Amino acid sequence: MQRTLDSVVAQSVPPTLWVIVDDGSTDGTSEMLADYAARHDWIRVVPKPDRGHRAVGPGVIEAFYAGLETVTLSDYPYLCKLDLDLDLPPRYFEILMEKMEADPRIGTCSGKPYMRRGGELVSERRGDEMSAGMTKFYRRDCFEDIGGLVREVMWDAIDCHKARAKGWRAVSWDEPDLRFEHLRPMGSSQVSIYEGRRRHGRGQYFMGSDPLYYLATCVFRMAEPPLVLGGLAMLQGYLGAWLRRARQLDDPDLIAFIRAYQRRALRVGKAKAVAEIDARMAAQNSAS
């Protein structure tokens, strides 16, 4: 947390307002946050009762909205959902805003997450067609257009798909000045990393991901630690939700959009599939 705090304080363009939600921490977090808030008048700490357990997905968005409810959103052209386990490069926010000013169709964006493994920074291999969930940067108009964030696992993919369906661009860049260190591994869990991977699979089922596309994703992730088993755990989570006929996103049109994109991506690759959507949406916007 302290590394995140220090990296945000050191930004070339720091936030006009940074709302940090303390949802029941008991490990000295509150004291540290109070100290930073006392030294920086643009930091505001919002206390929230401890829910009694970690709730990845719904809990994250619940905390986000607890902070957002204290803000007059119309006062700000941009907003960012930021986790407290990141080390950001010093020009991170400045560069994202420059890119969004240069392209008014960019609705959400981010840099790329890296994690330290064996003393070296290793990419988490996030696709260019998504903004990274741990540091979601939004144009306010896009955030409002998509109706905010779904309070479920996979909220951080659903927002990008919905933005794209509405004509916005969702993008991330792997550039030296936009690479940030993620201090916890993707898909980690308080139970085990395997449970984190299974949770991801359940989230993909909830989102309505195409089975063949998600199978390919699981195979792709088998090359990452824990080798093979991590990808199998993701597949186990998806299949388990499918067999239980678990609840899915209540938006048939968006699910159809997601599956059409995924099937196209299997044939021509994600980059070309996204480019086709962007070109089609740009043409529609020009015609209207």
Image: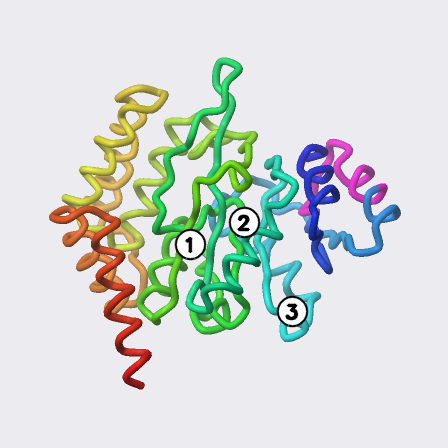
Position of residue 180 measured from the top left corner of the image (x, y, whole percent): 55, 36
Magenta segment:
22-35
> In 3D space, how far apart are the residues under numbered discs 2 and 1 (Cα atoms)?
10 Å
Residue drawn at x 50%, y 57% is 99
Residue drawn at x 39%, y 57% is 170
Residue at far bottom of view: 288
In this view, the residue in front, 84 or 168, is: 168
Q: Which residue is mark 3?
A: 76
In this view, the residue in front, 48 or 185, is: 185
First of labels 3, 1 by sequence position: 3
Categorize mark 2 by other alpha carbons within 10 Å: few (<14), some (14-19), many (20+): some
> In 3D space, how far apart are the residues under numbered discs 3 and 1 (Cα atoms)?
22 Å
Residue drawn at x 34%, y 70% is 167
Q: Which residue is mark 1?
A: 155
Q: Quick check: is 72 in the magenta stretch? A: no
What secondary structure is found at the residue carrying circle 3? loop
What secondary structure is found at the residue carrying circle 2? helix
Q: Which residue is mark 2?
A: 60
Position of residue 2 measured from the top left corner of the image (x, y, whole percent): 72, 34
First of labels 2, 1 by sequence position: 2
Count all numbered tags in the image, as a single digit.
Answer: 3
